[in-house]
Amino acid sequence: MSEEIKQLQKMIDDAKNIVVLTGAGISTASGIPDIRSATGAMNNKDLIKKYKYDYETIVSHSFFMARTDEFYRYYKEQMVFKNAKPNIAHKYLADLEKRKNVTIITQNIDGLHHFAGSHNIIEFHGTVFKNTCMDCGEKYSLEDIMVQEGVPHCKRCGGTIKPDVVLFEEGIDYQAITDSVNATQHADLLLVIGSSLVVYPAAGIPNYFKGNNIAIINKNATPLDDYAKLVIHDDIIKVFEQLK
């Protein structure tokens, strides 16, 4: 066990109230591509050529409203990974919740923290597993929308169903922000796992942390590295395989 891992283990062992901020990097080992790497959705030229629009355009509120069929083609093919399974990092955090007061604030929409067994989760950007009719508010599961060809419509009123995920140009749910800030202010350890910390307002959550114990586990550097007590630039799975 390296000195970095020993230090991380001690920080976790000594903490009582832990906030974990997770980004796309925690789920890549589960087969879900990230967004901002050189091969991620934002920079993948093959995807842009196939769908004729870049990622930020397709995954925006205005595009959803204007070209709903094209949005759903991309969404169903590139953003839904219903067969993905939690990896060791997700499972470790779920087990940690049995021993500590843990709040997970996730930027991911994949639901893997739920499937791993965590309960205290704030899905900052929503989840693909919840969907709502824009006209009458009827709720639908992921399976309900995946079985419909093209744009899914409400069985009750015929309205368009929208995934409960936050698109570009949309605001974050007020309760998600409030709960995230409150949990972070009362934490004695902040773990950042697999997040580039460049997507706001989620990237601003660490600003509310009042303690000194910040640990960042991410392959690449983040804007918060210089302020963290511990920074581990390594494969997330390798790190969590060594923790207990």
Image (tube, helix red, strand yellow):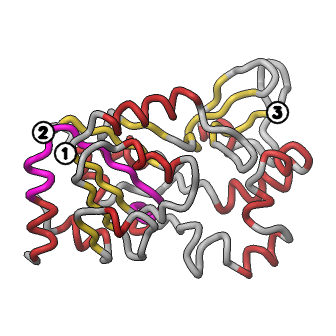
The residue nearer to you, when weighing 130 against 62, is 62
Question: x, y percentage for residue 12?
Answer: 15, 52
Q: Is residue 20 left or right of residue 144?
A: left
Q: Which residue is mark 3?
A: 160
Q: Which residue is mark 2?
A: 99
Residue 200: say if magenta: no
| Secondary element at image label 3 | loop
Indicate which disc, 2 or 3, sits on the residue closer to the N terminus.
Answer: 2
- Residue kind at label 3, given as amino acid type: Thr
| Crowdedness near tag 2: few (<14), some (14–19) or many (≥20) residues, C-alpha within 10 Å | few
Range of magenta residues: 10-27
Question: x, y percentage for residue 39?
Answer: 59, 80
Which quarter of the rendered picture does the N terminus lie within? bottom left
Label 2 vs label 1: CA separation? Answer: 7 Å
The residue nearer to you, when weighing 196 against 100, is 196
Indicate which disc, 1 or 3, sits on the residue closer to the N terminus.
Answer: 1
Asked if the residues shown at circle 1 and circle 3 are in contact, with their CB atoms under 8 angstroms apart, the answer is no
Front: mark 2 or 1:
2
| Secondary element at image label 2 | loop
Q: Name the residue: 75% across, 42% down.
A: 148
Q: Name the residue: 68% across, 61% down.
A: 77
